[in-house]
Amino acid sequence: MQNWLLKLIAVAAFIVAWQLMTPAAEVRPMSEPTISTNFSDVRNEARGKGPAHPSDKRAFHDQLRVDLRESARKTAIEGLSKPWSTFCSQEGQKRLVSAINYYFRERANQKSFYAQRGPDGEREWRELFRTADDNRIERLTREMYSRGYFQPDELPEPARATVTELVRDERVTGRPCG
């Protein structure tokens, strides 16, 4: 009886192994990419702008800076607009500081870049960071500071210097979480 059971198990194992080794579908190598591998094409096509000319490096990098500004603004507004009670947890406070840092770090990086273009670049930078969203972020940052939700010392440079200057005239009015 044992001999018969062992033979049955061996045959079943052989069938399972055979099935595992047989491919379920024919695998053929791709003849060419099915999506664009050109980074600027992908970015511009996603916005409905069509592919940028590859030789237009300045336009390409300008578009990257636009994308970074938009991302930084969105992150900051989302982070600063959360219910105040979320900033009392360690994770919530960490996210608040991270959102503020990302926005003001990107702002400082772009200020440095545009300053290399001379006085026209500095004027251009001031105009680029004078939107309603930028004003809202500055107002909410001052408000969060004055309510005691963060300290500029919690931010790394270059965001720390910018935020310190921004909140210089603000007074901390309390400790909301403690």
Image: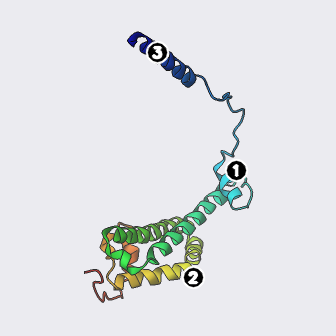
Q: Marks 1 and 2: CB-CB under 8 Å? A: no
Q: Residues within 10 Å of mark 3 (few under 14, many from 20)?
A: few
Q: Is residue 108 left or right of residue 150?
A: right
Q: Quadrant of the C terminus?
A: bottom left
Q: Is residue 143 left or right of residue 137?
A: left
Foreground mark, 1 or 3, reads: 3
Q: Residue at x 46, y 81 (%)?
A: 138
Q: Residues within 10 Å of mark 1 (few under 14, many from 20)?
A: few
Q: Amino acid at mark 2?
A: Ala
> Is residue 141 among what the camera can see?
yes
Relative to residue 84, is residue 36 depicted above or below?
A: above
Counting residues from the start of the chain, the first of labels 1 and 2 encountered is 1
Q: Nearer the viewer, residue 127 or 173?
A: 173
Q: Amino acid at mark 3?
A: Ala
Does dot 3 land on a helix, a strand or a loop? helix
Q: Residue furthest front?
A: 1
Relative to residue 10, is residue 178 depicted above or below?
A: below
Q: Quadrant of the N terminus?
A: top left
Residue wearing tag 1: 54
Q: What is the quadrant of residue 27 in the picture?
A: top right
Measure the alpha-carbon separation of dots 1 and 2: 33 Å
Foreground mark, 1 or 2, reads: 2
Counting residues from the start of the chain, the first of labels 3 and 2 encountered is 3
Q: Residues within 10 Å of mark 2 (few under 14, many from 20)?
A: few
Does dot 1 land on a helix, a strand or a loop? loop
Residue wearing tag 2: 132
Counting from the top left corner in percent of width and height, residue 39 is at 63, 50
Measure the alpha-carbon separation of dots 1 and 3: 62 Å
Counting from the top left corner in percent of width and height, residue 56 is at 69, 55
